[in-house]
Image (tube, rainbow, N blue to C red):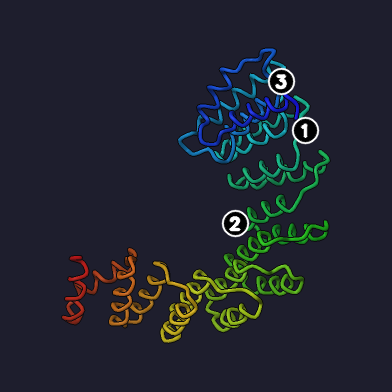
Amino acid sequence: MNRVGKNIHRYCTVFAAPTSPNSSLSAWHHHQPNPNRPNTRDTRSHLALRLAGNDLHPQREGMVEEANSILNLMIDKGVMPNIISYNSLLDGYCLRGQMDKVSKLMDLMVRKDCQPDVVSFNTMINGYCKAKNLDQAFHLFQEMSSKGVTPDVVTYNTLIDGLCKDGRLHQALHLFDEMEAQGLCPDVVSCASLLHGLCKNGKVNEAITRFTELERKGLIGNIVVYSILIDGMCEEGRLKDAANIFSKLLSKGLQPDCKIYTIMLKGLCKKGQLTQASQLLAKMEEHGFCPNEVTYNILVRGFLCNNDVTQALQLIDVMTGRGFSPDADNTSSLLDLLSNEQTEKSVKEWLQSSLEH
């Protein structure tokens, strides 16, 4: 690396210090061009990149505007920002939902002969999806081809997820099929988004059909995707189907985690199958998984709903001993028991003791 290259690298490292954007700004204002310092777009581009990047915290929101000011100053001085700088600023605005500024920045890019790339489009499409402006997201998607930019898996994933969350399942399914037709292989995010959308919109049968197809193609190899389908089945009361898939996880090389155990326990409790729920809880702990606060509260609620107060109180003893607390719903149920004249004296004494502690 020559001397100028080393200087550029050193300045960029200082300017891009992730923990000190204010220091970066001071450094940038201090280091005005002179014969001994590099006056290239790289130095300023990396500063704008750091200021507008993903690591900005809410309290640093003003840094995005500062980065935009620097970018405009670069242009005024005849130093053209590169695509990385523009993309970073686009991301900064998208993260804050400032889509009007995204549109203006996009226009500026084009006017300055910096054509948006796939990262630019993906960033903007994600921003519009988050802002629930799916029509504009699709407009950008269609614009990509006219600009000679090929959508990638991230592009499709973003749109599929946005469509599913908006309940536009037909379009999401069409886009998923189009992605495969274009020779792009769906990944875990693609599959999870589609199956989650189908299950949450009451189309569990279609989710199962899609799941089977994807599994046959070898595209389902992640515990998260199985969790989504099992959750959908449990929500519809299809415990046998859920248990069947759950029982095959180990044979597929997948280790059930706390989340998927909790999903199964919730399904069993909703059906009033508390004996099976207790057995699964024991199995969960045998396999080295500690129930979390959500797990315990689901079980406590199940026992309370089935008027098995004794078992519920025993579980509360266990969970509080492990540092967990009953949630608002369970606390409300316990207070109801305390004020109910038909509640046994021993139960009331236990509840009173617990409340005092």
Point out the image quarter for the C terminus. Answer: bottom left
Q: Are marks 2 and 3 in contact (CB under 8 Å)?
A: no
- Relative horizontal placement of residue 138, taking residue 100 as reference (left or right): right
Can you identify the residue that label 1 sits on? 115
| Label 2, residues with CA under 10 Å away: few <14, some 14-19, many ≥20 | many
Q: Disc 1 or disc 2, which is closer to the eye?
A: 1
Q: Quarter-wise, where is residue 304 in the image?
A: bottom left
Q: Which mark is residue 165?
A: 2
Task: Decide which of tag 1 and tag 2 comes sooner along the chain.
Answer: 1
**Image x and y of residue 194, in percent:** 66, 62
Q: Are marks 1 and 2 in contact (CB under 8 Å)?
A: no
Point out the residue furthest to the top here.
34
- Relative horizontal placement of residue 269, taking residue 35 as reference (left or right): left
Callout 1, which amino acid?
A: Gln
Can you identify the residue that label 3 sits on? 79
Q: Nearer the viewer, residue 86 or 126?
A: 86
Give how far apart the Cα atoms at labels 1 and 3 are.
Answer: 16 Å
